[in-house]
């Protein structure tokens, strides 16, 4: 039997889709905002000369990279979340942020290490403390190098955020799933949802490209 | 002013500084010369503790640099350091390169630091370059900005590690001139250099290093006309014959 398409399910539920898109963006942006300080701190600790400190930071990165995000989300929601009384929403943000934080930490570390050694030496020679040299000389330079990979990480974060539907956060993916369950229009709904995710990430990567170009010219 | 006593340093099991002793008095200028790998950079970098030492003592203006109790950041403000590769901050203008440490380390207020920075840059012939970024400057100009940056902290001594080795020949003199004018102010200096004419002209003592050791210390007239060691004779015949 041929599947006869009926796209009316899309305009009829536009409000719902829009709500899903907004929630997906909201969770991704929040997770990114939290993962940046996590990433900067863990990235700095990873290059610390203190062996214990750098070991702990490295362990964090390895653990986060070693477990699937889906498992981490379950663990935070069902184990930690019960204990700390986090709802699905904050469990999702926390899970995405700690997960993404490990990747941001690697980006930050690579950014710092890409700054030539002479920069730190010059700064320290003028009497700056290690912290001052980092803040005033190294991080501003690392920051510029880190922006493009950080933007890619944000795109990954948006796509990964579709997993939070499994802990019943009503994001774009869960809205789609529910809609398919009631309307039986799986081709239409999933195609449209794929298109929505693509539009979000594609727009974002175009914006990034624009800023990258603009920055290259001005340097 | 600078007193280096029995300094020893190894990298792994390679001895790079062996029993180094040196006394530099106020306003003296010492040239540090010797073949590649002799340990010149390592030695000059131990004077502001960019490089740690295994044994011995280095005293600059009464401060024991490698003593754990010394506040090394405060001590370093007394010691200006100029690198072979300039190491200017590429995201800051020439003027900001000069003012960032006075403002943040010495807590000088912005306008005072800027005034001082402009004066220093002008003194080094860079009055039209305040707002230029390092990438917009020639090598010689960059190195002069680096000298201004070091001077902005009002150091008591200045250390130069091959300040002209990364420069095109036509730019070497503008940097040497800056160091010459600094010499006239009575600044105490140690300069690692391959510019023998310059060493002869402005230095009080030539320190010749080889294989991690100080082989000979002599005034330039004596060192260049009649070195007392075979090592120095061999080195001079090589560098002066091309
Ligand atoms: N970080 C390091 N680790 C291991 N060995 C080093 C290190 N830095 C320098 N060395 C070694 O120490 C020795 C002295 O090096 P140094 O750079 O002080 O020589 P130099 O006299 O400045 O030479 P050049 O004229 O080539 O600059 C060399 O044998 C060098 O290979
Ligand atoms: Mg050297």
Image: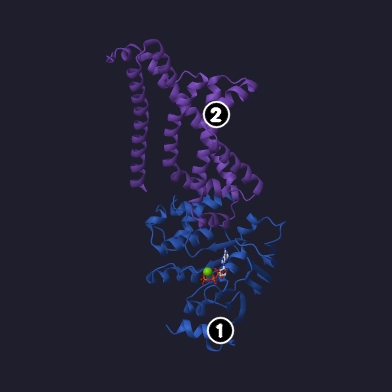
Where is residue B227 shown, x and y percent of the image? 57, 87
Chain letter for the residue marked with disc 2 in the picture: A
Q: Secondary structure at mark 2?
A: helix
Disc 2 beta carbon < 8 A from ligand 1? no
Q: Identify the residue at horizontal 61%, vertical 74% (top origin).
A: B212
**Colour assignment, chain B:** blue
Residue B134 appears in which quarter of the rendering? bottom left
**Furthest-right residue in this view:** B69
Please, is residue B139 above or below residue B193 in the view? Answer: above
Q: Quadrant of the C terminus of chain B?
A: bottom left
- Residue in front for this viewpoint, B25 or B10: B10
Do marks 1 and 2 share a chain?
no
Give the chain letter for purple: A
Disc 1 beta carbon < 8 A from ligand 1? no
Where is residue B73 shown, x and y percent of the image? 63, 55
Q: Tell me: B39 left or right of A160.
A: right
Q: Identify the residue at horizontal 56%, vertical 40% (top origin).
A: A61
**How would you rate the neighbour count of disc 2 (Cα within 10 Å): few for under 14, some for 14-19, many for 20 or more?**
few
Where is residue B121 shown, x and y percent of the image? 46, 59
Residue that mark 1 sits on: B232
- Residue in front for this viewpoint, B156 or B44: B44
Q: Is residue A96 visible?
A: no
**How would you rate the neighbour count of disc 1 (Cα within 10 Å): few for under 14, some for 14-19, many for 20 or more?**
many
Chain letter for the residue marked with disc 1 in the picture: B
Please, is residue B119 above or below residue B215 in the view? Answer: above
Q: Quadrant of the N terminus of chain B?
A: bottom right
Residue B14 appears in which quarter of the rendering? bottom right
Residue that mark 2 sits on: A71
**Furthest-bottom residue in this view:** B226
């Amino acid at each position: 039997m041929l599947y006869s398409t009926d796209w009316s399910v899309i305009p009829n539920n536009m409000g719902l889709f829009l709500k899903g898109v907004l929630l997906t963006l909201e969770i991704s942006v929040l997770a990114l905002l939290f993962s940046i300080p996590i990433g900067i701190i863990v990235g700095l600790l990873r290059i610390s000369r203190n062996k214990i400190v750098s070991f702990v930071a490295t362990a964090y990165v390895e653990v986060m990279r070693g477990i699937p995000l889906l498992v981490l989300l379950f663990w935070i929601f069902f184990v930690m979340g019960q204990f700390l009384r986090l709802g699905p929403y904050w469990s999702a943000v926390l899970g995405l942020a700690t997960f993404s934080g490990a990747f941001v930490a690697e980006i930050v570390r690579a950014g710092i290490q890409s700054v030539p050694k002479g920069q730190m030496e010059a700064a320290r020679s003028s009497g700056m403390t290690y912290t001052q040299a980092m803040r005033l000389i190294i991080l501003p330079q690392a920051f510029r190098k880190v922006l493009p990979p950080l933007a890619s990480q944000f795109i990954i974060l948006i796509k990964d955020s579709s997993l939070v539907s499994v802990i019943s956060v009503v994001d774009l993916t869960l809205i789609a799933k529910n809609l398919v369950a009631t309307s039986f229009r799986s081709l239409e709904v999933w195609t449209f949802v794929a298109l929505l995710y693509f539009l979000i990430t594609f727009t974002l990567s175009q914006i990034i490209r624009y800023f990258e170009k603009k920055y290259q010219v001005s340097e | 002013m600078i007193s280096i006593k029995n300094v020893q340093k190894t990298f792994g099991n390679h001895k790079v500084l062996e029993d180094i002793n040196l006394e530099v008095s106020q306003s003296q200028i010492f040239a540090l010369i010797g073949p590649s790998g002799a340990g010149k950079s390592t030695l000059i970098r131990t004077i502001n503790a960019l490089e740690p030492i295994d044994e011995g003592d280095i005293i600059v203006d009464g401060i024991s640099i490698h003593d754990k109790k010394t506040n090394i950041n405060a001590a370093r403000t007394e010691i200006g350091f100029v690198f072979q590769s300039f190491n200017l901050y590429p995201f800051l203008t020439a003027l900001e390169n000069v003012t960032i440490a006075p403002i943040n380390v010495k807590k000088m207020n912005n306008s005072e630091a800027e005034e001082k920075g402009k004066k220093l840059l002008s003194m080094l012939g860079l009055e039209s370059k305040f707002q230029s970024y390092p990438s917009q400057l020639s090598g010689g100009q960059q190195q002069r900005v680096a000298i201004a940056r070091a001077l902005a902290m009002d150091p008591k001594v200045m250390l130069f590690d091959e300040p002209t080795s990364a420069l095109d020949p036509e730019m070497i003199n503008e940097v040497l001139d800056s160091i010459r004018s600094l010499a006239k102010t009575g600044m105490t200096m140690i300069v690692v250099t391959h510019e023998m004419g310059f060493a002869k002209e402005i230095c009080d003592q030539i320190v010749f290093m080889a294989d991690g050791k100080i082989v000979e210390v002599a005034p330039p007239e004596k060192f260049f006309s009649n070195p007392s060691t075979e090592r120095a004779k061999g080195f001079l015949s090589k560098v002066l014959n091309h």
